[in-house]
């Protein structure tokens, strides 16, 4: 299962945090690290220096220009946020996260963390299935690499316990197929002048993404949806 999990850092600001994240992954037998538009570019000497014995993870770290490209190969995405968001997604604590994660042992999983200063944007969160909050006492802001370390430990610990949960055998569509569908839907809605007020377009698109990306659609269900949308868009319908 651990090999199917990737840690995605969106717009990380400090090379030291990237290096410490790689070290955390190495500590608990993870190996997949993805960066989205790191502020100081990539490769990064400070990241390599901080990674200690995790230089192998640093060397194979993948970099993407935007979050959509970074997430396209995943079936299920969990995003981590220190703040409560008014977003129509299921919000989980760390215990609930582990329980649900263990249901997806055959799926490709993306665990998404935001930049140090601001965390994930609402746009970033709209592409996730679930939003997870790490519990704290009063001060909720946790260093990026520390957050990753906590999550790594909790997953690693759960793998050493006998799980009574059953794996979900249904193959969930990859995010790249869902991106194609939502891009098509937004394109067709634009042609139909659905987004009449430009000021509200961004929030309306976010709401559409929140609706579809929280669903665990399989390929057949997604093809049916795409077929329905395409049929309804035809002029002679």
Image: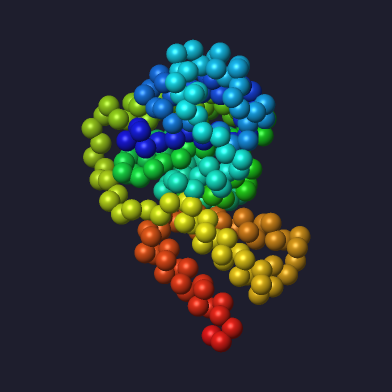
Residue 124 visible to an observer of this rendering:
yes
Residue 36 sits in which quadrant? top right
Residue 118 percent location from the top left of the image: 67, 34
Q: Quadrant of the N terminus?
A: top left
Residue 119 visible to an observer of this rendering:
no
Q: Residue at x 45, y 13 (%)?
A: 53
Q: Nearer the viewer, residue 5 or 113?
A: 5
123 is higher (above) or lower (below) than 225:
above
Residue 3 sits in which quadrant? top left
Query: In this figure, what is the number of numbered marks?
Result: 0
Q: Say whether residue 143 is left or right of residue 90.
A: right
Residue furthest to the bottom: 236
Q: Nearer the viewer, residue 104 or 95?
A: 104
103 is higher (above) or lower (below) than 138:
below
Residue 212 percent location from the top left of the image: 50, 58
Q: Nearer the viewer, residue 80 or 137?
A: 80
Q: Residue at x 44, y 45 (%)?
A: 74
Q: Residue at x 25, y 45 (%)?
A: 166
Q: Say whether residue 73 is left or right of residue 204.
A: left
Residue 72 percent location from the top left of the image: 49, 48
Q: Quadrant of the C terminus?
A: bottom right
Residue 133 percent location from the top left of the image: 51, 36
Q: Say whether residue 178 is left or right of residue 44.
A: left
Colouring of the image: rainbow
Q: Residue at x 51, y 51 (%)?
A: 89
């Amino acid at each position: 299962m651990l090999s199917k999990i990737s840690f995605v850092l969106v717009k990380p600001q400090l090379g030291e945090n990237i290096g410490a994240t790689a070290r955390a992954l190495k500590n608990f037998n993870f190996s997949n690290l993805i960066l989205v538009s790191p502020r100081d570019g990539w490769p990064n000497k400070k990241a390599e220096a901080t990674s200690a014995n995790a230089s192998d993870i640093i060397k194979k770290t993948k970099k993407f220009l935007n979050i959509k490209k970074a997430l396209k190969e995943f079936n299920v995405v969990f995003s981590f946020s220190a703040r409560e968001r008014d977003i129509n997604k299921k919000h989980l604590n760390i215990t609930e996260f582990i329980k649900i994660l263990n249901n997806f042992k055959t799926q490709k999983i993306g665990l998404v963390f935001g930049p140090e200063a601001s965390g994930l944007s609402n746009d970033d969160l709209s592409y996730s299935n679930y939003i997870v909050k790490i519990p704290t006492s009063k001060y909720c802001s946790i260093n990026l690499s520390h957050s990753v370390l906590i999550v790594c430990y909790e997953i690693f610990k759960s793998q050493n316990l006998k799980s009574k949960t059953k794996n979900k055998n249904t193959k969930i569509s990859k995010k790249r197929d869902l991106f194609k569908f939502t891009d098509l839907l937004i394109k067709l809605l634009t042609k139909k002048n659905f987004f009449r007020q430009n000021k509200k377009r961004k929030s309306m698109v976010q709401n559409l993404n929140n609706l579809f990306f929280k669903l665990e659609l399989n390929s057949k269900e997604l093809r049916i949806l795409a077929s329905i949308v395409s049929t309804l868009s035809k002029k002679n319908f």
